[in-house]
């Protein structure tokens, strides 16, 4: 009798437990549904504003600081900060502290998220917006100012360039890793390589030995002269020098097996654009080699070393290379003095099938 009563109570407790679990599951599902609805609504609300769409359009290529965006859009900081907060809250933007400045960048489209399709559609819509002449003119001035700051650094500091470079990452600290990759890529003596921003040109003789033709492109005349002197000492005759940058028309004439960007992207006004312009000459099956600082917080690098950007997250370089049609092949990370980390990245354009 007692046993039957115990059994009855146990079964009743089990049933109650199961009901509680079912209720909890239903509640959780309901909450998730609410969350999806809420985040979709917040997302659409964030996008439903002309100024916010223009912010997304302006950030198509690269990150910008609050005061840069204020100048471009001719709005005051408190108003813009509100819009940036709404866009960040909806996951459309992310902010990065760069020394004493905060920069905003568009968030990557995360394909695993329920909102990915909406996000893609919003960004595609923003990208189709035509910027008015005034905004375009201001954007042009901003890019020219960034470029000028970078060029002036090299112009004025060519003497102490090596010394400053040593504070962060002297070539000797990544030369071995880079040379190993160059050697593994080249069919000795044939093919074409292009180096953007060769600086004093330490890599050019190595490229010159492994490739039939090498193009060296630098936008600072003093640095290009220094690179020419380095090459002159080796007697190599297969290196062509171009004063200019990645937007130069000569790049379209080149069919490169390898493009090298060593410690140059953080000196460029629009690193994403520079990368995609530089690799437009990479032929199918060709490679892109990037040596770059990982993101850091050492703002003194701006003044002392002419850096426009405080390094880049490895995922960001992957994303930029990916959108320029390059697939990651290998990556290594090298610790440096003063707490810096270097990333040595190799990407490849898919060969023709
Ligand atoms: C830090 S140095 C790196 C030099 C060399 N690649 C190395 O690993 O030592 C950066 C070089 O990139 C050049 N540079 C900066 N911005 C450039 C741009 N937009 N186009 C071409 N060269 C650029 C600078 O003039 C400088 O020579």
Image: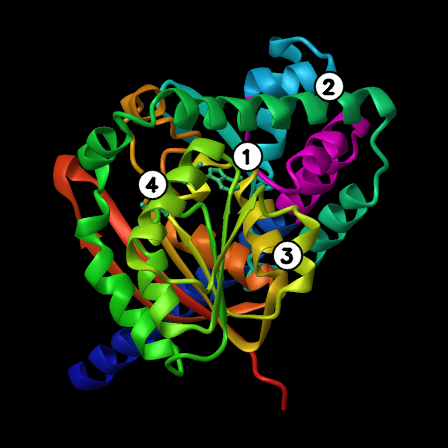
**In this figure, which residue is indicated by the disc labeled 2?**
73
- For the residues labelled 1 and 4, the Cα–Cα distance comes to 14 Å
- For the residues labelled 3 and 4, the Cα–Cα distance comes to 29 Å
Q: Residue at x 61, y 48 (%)?
A: 34
Image coordinates of residue 115 in percent, x first then y, are: 64, 54
Q: Residue at x 70, y 54 (%)?
A: 120
**In this figure, which residue is indicated by the disc labeled 3?**
251
Q: Is residue 162 left or right of residue 229?
A: left
Give the quarter of the image for residue 83. top right
Image coordinates of residue 294 in percent, x first then y, are: 32, 45
Give whichever of discs 3 and 1 has the lower sequence position: 1
- Which SS class for mark 4? loop
Disc 4 Cβ-to-ligand 1 distance below 8 Å = no
Q: Which residues are magenta?
A: 37-65
Callout 3–callout 4 Cβ contact below 8 Å: no
Dominant SS type (magenta):
helix
- Which SS class for mark 2? helix
For disc 4, the neighbor class at 10 Å (few under 14, some 14 to 19, many from 20) is: some
- Which SS class for mark 3? helix
- For the residues labelled 1 and 2, the Cα–Cα distance comes to 15 Å
Q: Is residue 72 above or below residue 179?
A: above
Q: Is 94 contained in the magenta span?
A: no
Q: Is residue 21 left or right of residue 163?
A: right
Q: Nearer the viewer, mark 3 or mark 2?
A: 3
* Disc on res. 157: none
Residue sitting at the far left: 337
Position of the C terminus by quadrant:
bottom right
For disc 2, the neighbor class at 10 Å (few under 14, some 14 to 19, many from 20) is: some
Image coordinates of residue 236 in percent, x first then y, are: 37, 62
Q: Is residue 352 above or below residue 66?
A: below
**In this figure, which residue is indicated by the disc labeled 4?**
295
């Amino acid at each position: 009798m007692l046993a039957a009563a115990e059994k009855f109570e146990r079964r009743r407790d089990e049933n109650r437990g199961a009901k509680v679990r079912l209720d909890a599951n239903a509640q959780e599902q309901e909450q998730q549904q609410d969350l999806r609805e809420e985040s979709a609504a917040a997302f659409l609300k964030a996008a439903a504003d002309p100024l916010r769409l223009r912010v997304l359009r302006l950030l198509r290529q690269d990150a910008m600081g609050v005061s840069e965006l204020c100048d471009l859009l001719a709005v005051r900081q408190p108003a813009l900060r509100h819009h940036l907060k709404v866009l960040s809250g909806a996951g459309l933007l992310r902010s990065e502290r760069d020394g004493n400045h905060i920069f905003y960048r568009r968030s990557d489209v995360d394909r695993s998220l329920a909102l990915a399709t909406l996000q893609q559609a919003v960004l595609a819509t923003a990208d189709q917006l035509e910027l008015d002449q005034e905004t375009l003119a201001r954007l042009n001035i901003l890019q020219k100012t960034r470029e000028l700051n970078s060029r002036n650094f090299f112009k004025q500091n060519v003497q102490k360039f090596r010394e400053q470079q040593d504070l962060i990452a002297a070539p000797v600290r990544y030369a071995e890793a880079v040379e190993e990759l160059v050697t593994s890529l080249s069919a000795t003596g044939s093919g074409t390589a292009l180096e953007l921003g060769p600086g004093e040109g330490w890599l050019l003789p190595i490229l010159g030995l492994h490739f039939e033709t090498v193009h060296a492109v630098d936008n600072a005349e003093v640095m290009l002269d220094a690179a020419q002197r380095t090459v002159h000492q080796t007697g190599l005759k297969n290196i062509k020098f171009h004063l200019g940058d990645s937007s130069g028309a000569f790049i379209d004439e080149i069919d490169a097996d390898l493009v090298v960007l060593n410690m140059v992207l953080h000196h460029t006004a629009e690193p994403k654009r520079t990368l995609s312009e530089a690799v437009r000459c990479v032929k199918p099956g060709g490679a892109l080699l990037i040596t770059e600082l990982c993101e850091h917080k050492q703002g003194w690098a701006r003044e002392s070393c002419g850096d426009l950007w405080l390094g880049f997250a490895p995922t960001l370089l992957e994303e930029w290379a990916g959108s320029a049609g390059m697939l990651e092949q290998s990556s290594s990370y090298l610790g440096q003095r003063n707490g810096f980390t270097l990333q040595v990245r190799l990407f490849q354009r898919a060969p023709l099938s």
